[in-house]
Image (cartoon, rainbow, N blue to C red):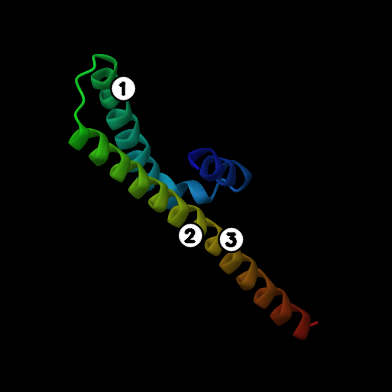
Amino acid sequence: KARGILTLIEEDPKDLARARKFLKVYLDGTARVAESYAKTHGRNATTEVLDTNFQEVLDSIETTFDEQHKKLLQNDQFDLDVKIEVLKTQLKHI
């Protein structure tokens, strides 16, 4: 899901400004939590509660990534709508 967001940003770099906070907060936070969980899990130090909490946070992250992806697509649609309206206006004045 993160790769999909990064691909959208790569294809349309102006999305970077919109997604910067999301990328900083969620990608960094996700990486830190996943690394910590992997270390704990690797030492067989997890509990059922910890495993459940980790799965819940992964589900929340997935939902948040889906929402961000949708927002970026909606922004692209909005930008296209604006361009169409500008072109229509220009064509009326020719």
Q: Secondary structure at mark 2?
A: helix
Mark 1 = which residue? 38
**Which secondary structure lies at badge 3?**
helix
Q: Is residue 36 above or below residue 23?
A: above
Q: Nearer the viewer, residue 59 or 73?
A: 59
Residue annotated with mark 2: 71
Q: Please state which of the two labelled residues, at mark 1 or mark 3, is closer to the viewer.
A: 1
Q: Nearer the viewer, residue 20 or 67?
A: 67
Specify few, some or many for label 1: CA neighbours under 10 Å numbering under 14, 14-19, or 20 or more: few
Mark 2: few, some, or many residues within 10 Å (few <14, many ≥20)? some
Residue at which label 3 appears = 76
Residues at marks 2 and 3 touching, judged by CB atoms closer than 8 Å? no
Residue type (three-letter) at the residue carrying disc 1: Ala
User: Going from the N terminus, do you reach mark 2 or mark 3 first?
Assistant: 2
Task: Measure the alpha-carbon separation of dots 2 and 1.
Answer: 31 Å
> Can residue 33 be seen in this snapshot?
yes
Q: Quadrant of the C terminus?
A: bottom right
Query: CA–CA distance between discs 2 and 3?
Result: 9 Å
Q: Residue at x 45, y 54 (%)?
A: 68
Residue at 29 percent of width and 29 percent of height: 32
Instruction: Tell me: 73 left or right of 83.
Output: left
Q: Amino acid at mark 2?
A: Lys
Residue 24 vertical placement versus 65 (above, below): above
Task: Name the mark nearer the viewer: 2 or 3.
Answer: 2
